[in-house]
Amino acid sequence: MATRSTFVYSAAAVRRLMGLPSSVPVQIREFLDVIWVWVKGDRPTFISKTDFKHHFVERRKEDARELEVTDWLRDPPRYTVTNPNSGSQHVVSEYADRLDCDCEDYRWQQQFIGRGCCKHGYAVLQYLGFDSLKTFVEAGTTGLQTTLVLPTR
C-alpha cells in the first residue's frame, strides 16, 4: 500500500536513481530535506528529496513519449491516450489550470500530493506543445485555441 511518503520516496525509485537491479534490498528513512538510503553491503548515503521529485516527474515524461494521443475536440477538450504496447487507454480532460486523468497514478497524486500529472497527462502536454504542466498552466489556455469561422451565405 502506498503512503504519502512511499509514493515519491520509494525503494524502487532509489534503485532507479542508483542504477541498482530490482532484486537489491534497500532501506530508506525520510528526513526533513533528504532520504537516508542503505543498500546492503554499502555505507548509508543521502539522496535529496528534490532529486526524488525530479526523478518522479522525468520518469513520467519519459514514459509519455511512447503513448498515442487522440483529440476528441469537445468542451472541455478531452483526449484518449493509448499505450500501443498494452492497448490500455485513459481519458484526459483539459482545463485551463490542470489536466485530469482517470488513471490510478493521477488519483494517487491527487490524494497524496494534492495535484500532479501522470504519464497520460504528459503525453497530452507533449501533444499540445508544452514541456511541463507549469508552462501549460501559465499559458492559461485550453487546446481549443483556434476559433472556427464558418462561411456565411
Image (cartoon, rainbow, N blue to C red):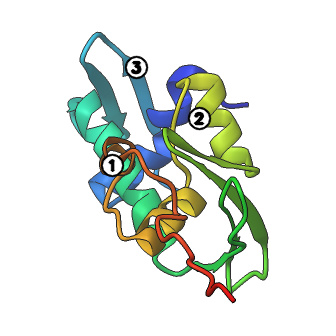
Residue 77: where, in percent of width, then height?
Answer: 65, 60
Disc 3: which residue: 29
Q: Is residue 48 visible?
A: no
Mark 3 or mark 2, whichever is nearer to me = 2
Q: Amino acid at mark 3?
A: Arg
Residue 148: where, in percent of width, then height?
Answer: 57, 76
Q: Which quadrant of the figure contains the C terminus?
A: bottom right
Tell me the tag on residue 91: none
Nearest the viewer among 69 and 4 is 69
Residue 42: where, in percent of width, then height?
Answer: 25, 40
Around disc 1, counting alpha carbons within 10 Å, would you say few (fewer than 14), some (14 to 19), or many (20 or more)? few
Mark 1 or mark 2, whichever is nearer to me = 1
Where disc 3 sits, the SS reads strand
Q: Residue at x 32, y 31 (%)?
A: 37
Where disc 2 sits, the SS reads helix
Disc 1: which residue: 139
Around disc 3, counting alpha carbons within 10 Å, would you say few (fewer than 14), some (14 to 19), or many (20 or more)? some
Q: Residue furthest top?
A: 32
How far separated are the C-alphas under marks 3 and 2? 21 Å
Nearest the viewer among 12 and 62 is 62
Around disc 2, counting alpha carbons within 10 Å, would you say few (fewer than 14), some (14 to 19), or many (20 or more)? some
Disc 2: which residue: 109
Residue 149: where, in percent of width, then height?
Answer: 56, 78
Mark 3 or mark 1, whichever is nearer to me = 1
Q: Is residue 132 above or below residue 115?
A: below
How far separated are the C-alphas under marks 3 and 1? 38 Å
Where disc 1 sits, the SS reads helix
Q: Earlier in the sequence, mark 3 or mark 1?
A: 3
Residues marked 3 and 2 touching at CB (< 8 Å): no
Q: Which quadrant of the view contains residue 89?
A: bottom right
Nearest the viewer among 96 and 51 is 96
Q: Amino acid at mark 2?
A: Gln
